[in-house]
Image (cartoon, rainbow, N blue to C red):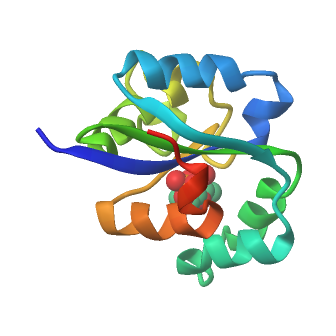
Amino acid sequence: MTTERTFSIIKPDATRRNLTGAVTKLLEEAGLRVVASKRIHLTRDQAEEFYGVHRERPFFNDLVSFMISGPVVVQVLEGDNAVAKNRDVMGATNPANADAGTIRKELAESIEANSVHGSDSLENAATEIAFFFTSDEIVG
Ligand code: CMP
């Protein structure tokens, strides 16, 4: 087993419904440890840069508007195989396709308002963590 760090966002649909704790509980029960966390309101520029890989996708503008529609909680999660473990507990992007017990099945509203983002690789995790956190903000 390898200890990894991954990046997570609790999205505006979850903060709006006061589900920050409910999401974090599922992350922790999956064996992930929150080693950095802050509640912020993304700017449009930040959201566009963060999701830049999706710039040409038809849902890009709606995605950015949604992500700046309310506060988010950005987190660094640590644990054995944290990238895969986080993706497992998040569930499929579309909550309609997510397995029972996953965050998106239990809590998400739609493919857009899907409650959480999680890094899809160790390499992207490092990039996404560095986008929001300095090393002294991460306390393992
Ligand atoms: P996330 O893991 O944050 O990465 C990109 C996001 O785009 C994704 O979660 C979804 O919330 C959002 N999205 C909105 N519409 C779609 C779609 N049709 N296909 C994939 N992702 C979508």
Residue 116 falls in image quadrant: top right
Answer left or right for 6 relative to 54: left
Quarter in which the C terminus is drawn = top left
Q: Report the residue at 66% width, 49% height from top.
A: 112
Outermost front residue: 136
In this rendering, does residue 52 appear at all?
Answer: yes
Residue 53 vs 20, above or below: the answer is: below
Residue 130 falls in image quadrant: bottom right
Outermost bottom residue: 56
- Decide which of 43, 13 is in the foreground and name it: 43
From the top left corner, tell me how far across and down residue 5 is, in percent: 37, 49
Residue 89 vs 128, above or below: the answer is: above
In this rendering, does residue 114 appear at all?
Answer: no
- Decide which of 87, 112 is in the foreground and name it: 87
From the top left corner, tell me how far across and down residue 62 is, in percent: 77, 64
Which quadrant of the frame does ligand 1 lie within?
bottom right
From the top left corner, tell me how far across and down residue 73 is, in percent: 71, 42
Q: Report the residue at 75% width, 72% height from top.
A: 46
Answer left or right for 59 relative to 8: right
Count of marks overlaid on the render: 0
Q: Report the residue at 72% width, 22% height from top.
A: 19
Residue 12 vs 61, above or below: the answer is: above
Answer left or right for 8 relative to 79: right
- Decide which of 4, 92 is in the foreground and name it: 4
Quarter in which the N terminus is drawn = top left
Q: Report the residue at 51% width, 33% height from top.
A: 34
From the top left corner, tell me how far across and down residue 26 is, in percent: 49, 19
